[in-house]
Amino acid sequence: MSGCADPAPAILFDNLGKSYPKAGGAVVALQDVSLAVPKGSITGIIGRSGAGKSTLLRMVNGLERPSRGRVLVEGQDVGQARGPALRRIRRDVGMIFQHFNLLASRNVRDNVALPLEIAGMARSQIRARVAELIEQVGLGALAERYPAELSGGQKQRVGIARALATGPKVLLSDEATSALDPETTQTVLNLLAQINRELGLTVLLITHEMAVLRDIASHMAVIEAGRIVESGPTYDIFARPAHPTTRRFLAGVTGATLPAFVAERLAPEPPGDPVIRVTFAGAHATDPMLARLATDLGISANILGGTIEEIGAKPFGNLLISVPLDRGAETRAFLERHGLTTEVLGHVR
């Protein structure tokens, strides 16, 4: 996904830069961002607050314009578009917001109808289209309700229906689940996945939660200080994160974090038994490798923590183990010879 490798991406960020003027210089929000978002994918961009992810997202529908480089949506240069050309691009790009952005004076039906009214669609067509959208997001019984009468999850469903009103090819999600509780978040993510499947829409979402990408994204990119530091298929990045920022984001969702009772006793060097993180991914993710370690080499591993889960219908997991100091190198060589990834986190007595 990184760079410009995809010959026909839905969205292409090409050497993108964005700066804002400031007394005595400029604030650089984005630097040399190149990223290709595959058509029909759900691609997530993760980063801390201030990393530049919201600025990047707003480039896609022309709410921000690049200082350098290009943003192409379905081959159209957003930064160069003006007037009718920009309006056509924006009809192809729907957007859902963190805080819903619904009009309090309009009920569900009228909130969803708003972009169609702005587009000048005939009233009879609007009624039919809105009814279809409200049913699609599961709010048919709430069409007459006002935002104040809706839960957070229901409001976000209205926002999704409104974003789909003009039949976009791309759907942008600006932290759309960060204001929701975990159960409602999962419901909204399931809806986005369903829309992606059924309509073939490309979904580009930004988040600061790795669990969101684990649950929904086929591809992902990590942004740090305005630069993309890592990108690719979500499964590959979860299995073999290359950048320290990615590893920090992953620590809380992949069972890769040491329990406190171990972490507080961890030392960077011997003496002490090595604590090894073993990543199970790919073809060997379900092989009984610790059992084979014991039977083949006579090495008993002490399991300190970990998780086994599924990403994109493929098994994935991390186990944290310790083994005797004099068997650490042998353990790692055995596991890596069988397709697993290992990393020594430190030593503990």
Image (tube, helix red, strand yellow):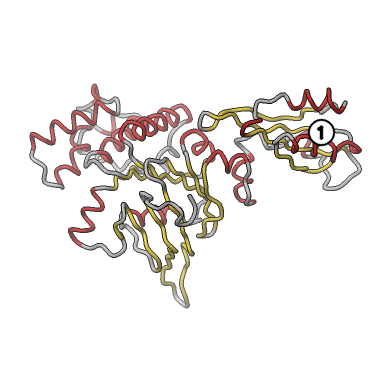
| Image height of 296 relative to 341, above or below | above
| Image height of 179 relative to 8, above or below | above
Q: Position of residue 144 (x, y in %)?
A: 19, 27
Q: Residue at x 72, y 24 (%)?
A: 288
Marks counted in the figure total 1
Q: Residue at x 43, y 34 (%)?
A: 180
Q: Position of residue 168 (x, y in %)?
A: 26, 43
Q: Would you call the spot at circle 1 few (<14 residues within 10 Å), some (14-19), or many (20 or more)?
A: many
**Left or right of 122: which side holds 109?**
right
Q: Which residue is mark 1?
A: 322
Q: Position of residue 164 (x, y in %)?
A: 26, 39
**View extreme (bottom): residue:** 24
Q: Residue at x 49, y 33 (%)?
A: 215
Q: Determine the secondary structure under disc 1.
A: strand
**Left or right of 133: which side holds 334?**
right
Residue type at mark 1 is Ser
**Left or right of 277: which side holds 45?**
left
Nearest the eye: 93 or 233? 233
Instruction: Tell me which corner region of the image, top left, top right, bottom left or bottom right, holds residue 314.
Output: top right
Q: Position of residue 181 (x, y in %)?
A: 46, 31
In the rendered image, the quadrant that contains the C terminus is top right
